[in-house]
Image (spheres, rainbow, N blue to C red):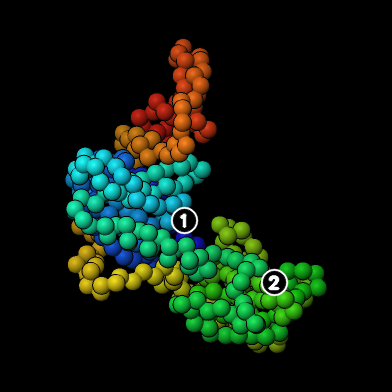
Amino acid sequence: MALTWEDKEIRFDIPFTEMKLRPSEKIIDRLDSIEDTKGNGGDRGRLIVTNLRILWHSMTTPRISLSIGYNCIISSSTKTVNSKLRGTTQALHILSTSNNVRFEFIFTNLIPGNERHFTSIMGVHKAYISSRLYRELKMRSAVVHNKQLRILPLEQIYTTLHGVWNLSSDQGNLGTLVITNVRMVWFADMNEGFNISLPFLQMSTIKLRESKFGMALVVTSSPISGGYVLGFKIDPEEKLHSIHKELTSLYAIYSNNPIYGVEFTWSHADEFRENASLIEDMEEGTDDPRGEMTNTLSAYLADEGHLKDREPVYNNDIGLAIEQLKDGFTLQKLWEVIPSDKI
């Protein structure tokens, strides 16, 4: 049940179905006077900050939109820009990467003196980075101290079971299994640095399977986390079945209401209440834009450190000398108005 793409990809001009929030994705802030200065200068839009990504869409043409996953963000800072609607002003500059391509985004608040978009995005992104243990598989990390699990802020321990064999090696390793409301953790008794923390978010299957050590609990991680197969030997067998039942039950509960761990608290409790409504008001008229004519992607390409133009090279296809293309680009892609993969 791993997160599919929301926090890990950058998407342009997405349909309303992809703008809708996934289970447990929640809106943290919403601002209705934000200009996408880099790609849609002069167009007033709405910026929506959730616990997984940044959404922006044009107020006049909602199908013109962005979805920026926090995992794609490299850095965020302030930058002096020339806005078509505000003139020279300070804006939020976001440098990001997706599919090995670097993009930059510039968001300008059209309300003079309002810097809330700085606070929201920078604060939530920091919370996202600091809460990776809720969402990512970790091995040999500092999750245990003095034989005790370091408990996360939203975490509750349900079961601590000693004498559990990890079957990752031929002879097995004896250790302790801890089950909480967000993850399963095992660490070796002889070396607590030999451990694994597997969130329910990254679990694919939980099964009982026969092994050379006898019946074992086998947990498979999602392909995005490496597709690891983890085996654990628990005695007696009644306890093995009890742990399997507990894990399966907690996994089902978590699947219905995932805990991503991204928490952001406003200093003023009422500051966001007026904007806390969902995004249903943009549903009507927001069609699927894929396949329409668009050259959106090129507007956001980042070319940091560009000091001079690349050397010209002769191109046989058009019979002209052109600037050498950057890695990952072809002349055909640059000339396409409708991307071939959208036809």
Three-letter amino acid code at the position of disc 2: Phe
Residue at 64% x, 85% y: name it.
161
Residue at 48% x, 67% y: name it.
131
List x then y, in percent, for residue 342. 39, 37
Q: Quadrant of the C terminus?
A: top left
Residue found farthest to the right? 171
Give the secondary structure at mark 1.
Answer: helix
Q: Residue 260 appears in which quarter of the rendering?
A: bottom left
Q: How busy is the neighbourhood of tag 2: few (under 14 within 10 Å), some, or many (20 plus)? A: some
List x then y, in percent, for residue 295. 34, 34
Disc 1 to disc 2, C-alpha distance: 27 Å
Give the secondary structure at mark 2.
Answer: loop
Relative placement, left or right, of 228 versus 6 is right
Residue at 51% x, 34% y: name it.
328
Residue under label 2: 194
Q: Which mark is residue 71?
A: 1
